[in-house]
Amino acid sequence: MKKPFKVETEQWISDSRCAVPAETKMVADVRLFASDWEIRNFDGVDKDTISPLYAGQSDRIKAMKTKWYWPVVNPVYRLYANVKVRTILFAKMDKKTAFVKLKNKVHVKWKNRYSVRMKRNRAFLRSIELGPEEGKRQSEFVFQKPVKISVIVPLYNTPEKYLRDMIQSVQKQTYRHWELCLGDGSDPEHSYVERVVREYADKDDRIVYQRLEKNEGISGNTNACLAFATGDYVALFDHDDMLHPSALFFVMKEIEEKGAEFIYTDEMTFEKDDIRHIATLHFKPAYSPQNLNGVNYICHLSVFRRSLLDTNGLYRDEYDGSQDHDMILRLTTAAKVVSHIPKVLYFWRVHPGSVSDNIEAKPYAIDAGKRAVHDNEARLGREAEIHSSCICATHYRLDYAIEPKKTRIIITCRDSDKDLARLLSSLDERTEWGEFEVTIARCRGTEAAAVPGLVTVDQNEGETIAAFMNRLVRETKEEFVVFLDSHMELVDGLFLKRLQQYAQQPDIYAVSSRITDSYGMVEEAGYIIGLGEDKICLPIEHKNNYSAPGYMGRMYYAHNVSAASFFGMMVRRETFLSLGGFNETLDEPSLIGPDYSLKCREAEKQVVLNPYVIHLSHAPLLMGYSDEGKKEAAKKTFHSLWDKTISKGDPYYNANLNRDGSFTFDMDSL
């Protein structure tokens, strides 16, 4: 890429003595953060040789591994090696950085210690138990237009306990107008499957069983079940899982009250064939198309109008292993109303051999998932390469085809030249993609001088920051605009590409970034609306390490958020101005982005957080711009505009989660 700045600008940066190197550890780490998952075969390989903790083992240690006493010595050696390596790393690290990282790690570990997790899980199970009175009320509830729901279950060599648990969980449904369609592709060695099913079917004519002529895989067997299903809606159910007794009742309520064509619920996974051994509680957001591209977060329980299959087709065996992801992508795109029930109504059993237990054992499922996302995006007219994230093979990073467009970068500046020089230097040295022009927006009271070779504009007297930004956007000719602050430092060389890939899409009106402090701890990664001291918004992932996976791995795929800061945000000039730009009456920088984000939501447009775009912040952004009086006035204005929206809750932060924004189950709600 050609150098973005003129000679006089580069000389000014050099004279400031604040130039940054092109490569630092943080830059390298962020590049590694965006690397791809790789499945490697370690059969017969001494894994210590590829572990960063034990790779430097001596010949004496290698010889000891062949001795009979090694199993006894091994735990002691591993502890010694672990302590030694971590001590060396700690000694090499800046002491303040090391302390901050250690303090945050201890805090997170303590907050999520085993005893606390188990206490939460036990309380949760008690909270979702269906009492006799509520069960009776649901069973006697009269729907105006009840529909038949076909519960589709392809069977294959299902263990008897799992089979009985599954069938009985359907029979216990408080909503009675269902049929259980069981297509059996089991081999002759598992003939007991038919015997067990017929035992139930003989007593309950809602259970429909067919012995399939041959096993045609998960997609073929599911299609066979669909062929003899007669319901108006279809519920997808795995042969080794269980439903909550109220599952179909709440699904029917969504159908009747909202006209929902696709419905999904929250779920939990459990281990050891005992529902009390909870592995995960998955509290999902409302329908989030970007999240669904990143991972099949919808998964179970999924229920949809049967007629959607007429125009979108049945299951396709080329997606076996990720056939549900393919189907859900197609159906949610086509459905007029996609509805989420924020209740755990599905119990997913984790056991050896299941995809949920060991995805590495099923590379075909990984490839099928990538193709499912790719093909759905292609149907929507978007070409993208799909990569597995570096932490999980079925969490996807999308790399969209893009025609590079020059971007206008607007940098707010309030403090000295040194901060601004550092940011400009990082843009000059580290940007790897795209062309841009820079406007320096000098706020009132700034000490910074005009930068040679760059457009410099001063804030007018009485002009708010929002009005200042709007004026600069109107004056620019570039199609895309990014807002930065002089306290920031660029670390992701592909940030323009990663932002523009999403901003180019017509239904996305804002794309935002993650901002960390100088120690790599997240300051903000979007906002949860309605939380925090002022009940306005709360930063997501605040003070977590930037490399932490986030809730259900969401920091490793682009996802929808309700609100984002305007710092690090990219907008398309035309659509930004069509919404009226930033609210010029809000004279408080921290509220400008959230307010604009809610305007996007009101217009039924998306706000997307791309977690792979990471910026450093060396000080609070536009610190001290507003006095306390202006801040309070801005907060009152914000509430007057958005209280009705805020009262509905954040659609991307499940109502079951803690009100402190921690993405943990809210114990206080029990």
Image (tube, grey):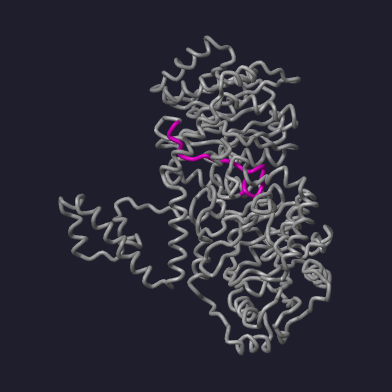
Q: In the image, what residue occupies the spot 53% across and 9% down?
A: 203
| Residue 291 within the magenta-colored segment of the rendering | yes
Viewer-proximal residue among 588 and 628: 628
Tell me if residue 251 can be seen.
yes
Task: Identify the residue at the far front of this view.
Answer: 629
Q: Is residue 584 above or below residue 379?
A: below
Residue 450, image x, y percentages: 73, 85
Using the rendered view, name the quadrant where residue 453 is placed: bottom right
Residue 59, image x, y percentages: 20, 65
| Residue 385 within the magenta-colored segment of the rendering | no
Residue 155, image x, y percentages: 49, 26
Tell me if residue 213 can be seen.
no
Q: How many marks?
A: 0
Viewer-proximal residue among 340 and 532: 532
Using the rendered view, name the quadrant where residue 91 is placed: bottom left
Viewer-proximal residue among 499 and 273: 273
Looking at the rendered image, the quarter that the C terminus falls into is top right
Left or right: residue 16 compared with residue 521: right
Left or right: residue 414 compared with residue 166: right
Residue 1, image x, y percentages: 63, 76
Q: Is residue 626 above or below residue 359?
A: below
**Residues in magenta, as a range:** 276-293
Left or right: residue 400 compared with residue 632: left
Viewer-proximal residue among 18 and 300: 18
Q: Is residue 167 above or below residue 121?
A: above
